[in-house]
Amino acid sequence: MIGLIVNGLLGGFVRSFVGVPCACLLSICAIFGCVRCMRCHCRARDCGCLKRFFRVTGHDKFDDFEFLMLVHEAIFEHRGAKMTTVVRVTAGLHTVRTDPNSNGIFQQPLTIFVEQGTTQIDVDLMDTNGRVLSTLSLDPHENILSPKNMITEQVFNMKQKNKHIRTPKIKLSMVVSNGSDAELGLISGVSSDTDILVRQQLLKAKEVGKANAAGKSVEGEPSEMDVLKEACCGPLEIFEGLGKTSSVYVAIVGPPVSRRYMLGIWDNKHDFDAKKRAIEEVDLLKIQSVQADPTRHHVFVVNYFDESRVPQTLTFRRIDRARDVWVEILYLLVTKARNAPKKVRRDKTLAVDAKPSPRGLTSIFSRGTRKVQ
């Protein structure tokens, strides 16, 4: 009996003596484990409870989100022949990249998914061999989520990583997708990326229209057709046969300058501003389709009938904006022009903008755009 009591007392003393340090050690390991988990992106946030805990405690400043980055162009000094480059965007475990381009003008939208806890987004300019030429680091919270307005055509200085280029810069536009995007009721056939880019181009054209009206002391908002015309002007490359291309400037002219709405082609913008005669004109009413080339992501084709009712085509390659933006806005212009003659006969006037078209800018900003088939 005495032996049992002694053994029990000694055993309890030993267990308590050993148990306290073990408990402390386990507590310390748990604390360091939590800290390590907070720093470890790929493990801790796979657990929903820990993911919510990091967000509630303020350790993570944002939830998962998705944003659209339009890579306009990479600007750098380079000796020798043209260099083919690629832009790669990395956000944590997710990576997307542009198609290769030899002149640094990409005009390509990229959709990037950013997971909660991502500390930085890396934008790398690379050559075709995968070597990083320059890099740019963006903070998801400070550079993307914090700005109240959409970042439009902003030039960022990049950090040089290779001696083959100097003073690298990159021009980007960024917009964050939110819950309201699903409520826009996009018309079938139009991707959300294209919809955002078209809206951006129209808003930009509207601001230019306001500035021009203010310079001419004209009151009121620019009409729907004026906004579309402004959005559908810019530089393009036209294919002339056997793969040869030349730079041109494309714009839309209409009343009162012209009796009909015409797609005009000039050698350059200076000739257009000087109101010189276009080297070629196409009546918008005779355009049958505007199609994106399925094999060349920078090229689109305008199919139309000439004055002799002979089918003709114009093949363009984009320069200053995404190819699909040209396709969508040209489609809207052709649709608007086709609705105009009926209105002219009814009102016996050329005031085609007095009554908005049911598929005019009002529907564009509220419902999106329709893809040309």
Image (cartoon, rainbow, N blue to C red):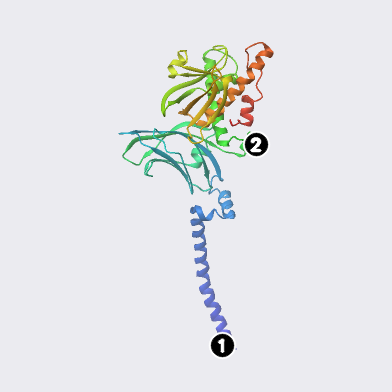
Query: What kind of element bears circle 2?
Result: helix
Query: CB under 8 Å between callouts 1 and 2?
Result: no
* Residue 13 found in image quarter: bottom right
**x and y percentages locating residue 221 in the rendered image:** 59, 19
**x and y percentages locating residue 233 in the rendered image:** 50, 22
Left or right: 257 as drawn, with respect to 124? right
Q: Residue at x 66, y 16 (%)?
A: 343
Nearest to the eye among marks 1 and 2: give it. 2
- Can residue 200 be seen at all in this image of the molecule? no
The quadrant the C terminus occupies is: top right
Q: Residue at x 61, y 37 (%)?
A: 181
Left or right: 140 as drawn, with respect to 359? left
Q: Residue at x 61, y 28 (%)?
A: 364
Query: What kind of element bears circle 1?
Result: helix
Q: Which is more toward the observer, 122 or 81?
A: 81
Q: Which is more toward the observer, 164 or 138?
A: 164
Q: Residues within 10 Å of mark 1 (few under 14, many from 20)?
A: few
Q: Amino acid at mark 2?
A: Glu
* Residue 190 found in image quarter: top right
Q: Circle 2 is placed at which residue position? A: 183
Q: Circle 1 is placed at which residue position? A: 3
**x and y percentages locating residue 39 in the rendered image:** 48, 53
- Asked if residue 322 is positioned above or below residue 261 in the image, the reply reads below
Q: Amino acid at mark 1?
A: Gly
